Image (tube, grey):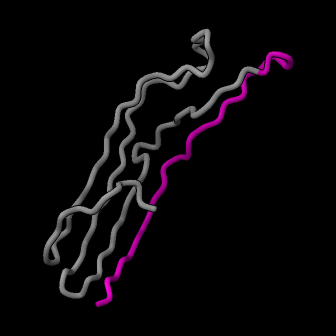
């Protein structure tokens, strides 16, 4: 599934594009706001370019999620019995290519 939801308004055969640039504040994964258990503030960039032909109903989309390939901590868990912190990371940069066809 491409990262940019919705469709870009296009007519004819010209290309169109969508971008998504959300800024997300720091998130703490515990109730004491321990800096070792947080995901820093970040800005992720998603982009998509669509080329299509309205008469034939065929379009092709190339999309990228996390364009800057930023490392994002999606969860952290202190495992105090063993003396370390387990972190889970969000997926790295991902590319998508989609072809759509409308049959009438």
**Tag count in the figure?**
0
Q: Residue furthest bottom?
A: 104
Q: Is residue 92 magenta?
A: yes
The image shows residue 24, relative to residue 104, as above or below, that is above
The image shows residue 14, relative to residue 53, as above or below, that is above
Q: x%, y% of residue 63?
A: 37, 60
Q: x%, y% of residue 104?
A: 28, 90
Q: Residue furthest top?
A: 32
Q: x%, y% of residue 8?
A: 23, 62
Residue 22 picture quarter:
top left
Q: Is residue 11 left or right of residue 33?
A: left
Q: Is residue 96 left or right of residue 35?
A: left
Residue 64 picture quarter:
bottom left
- What residue is drawn where x is 73% and y is 20%? 78
Q: x%, y% of residue 61?
A: 34, 68
Q: Is residue 83 magenta?
A: yes
- What residue is drawn where x is 34% and y is 82%? 101
- What residue is drawn where x is 52% and y is 36%? 71
- What residue is drawn where x is 30% and y is 59%? 6
Residue closest to the eye, 9 or 21: 9
Residue 3 picture quarter:
bottom left
Instruction: Identify the magenta region.
Output: 79-104
Q: Residue furthest right?
A: 81
């Amino acid at each position: 599934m491409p990262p940019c939801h919705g469709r870009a308004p296009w007519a004819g055969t010209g290309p169109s594009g969508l971008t998504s640039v959300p800024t997300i504040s720091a998130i703490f994964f515990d109730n004491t706001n321990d800096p070792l258990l947080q995901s820093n503030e970040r800005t992720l960039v998603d982009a998509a370019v669509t080329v299509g032909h309205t008469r034939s109903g065929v379009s092709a989309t190339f999309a990228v999620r996390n364009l800057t390939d930023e490392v994002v901590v999606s969860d952290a868990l202190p495992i105090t019995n063993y003396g370390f912190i387990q972190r889970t990371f969000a997926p790295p940069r991902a590319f998508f290519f989609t072809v759509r066809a409308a049959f009438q």
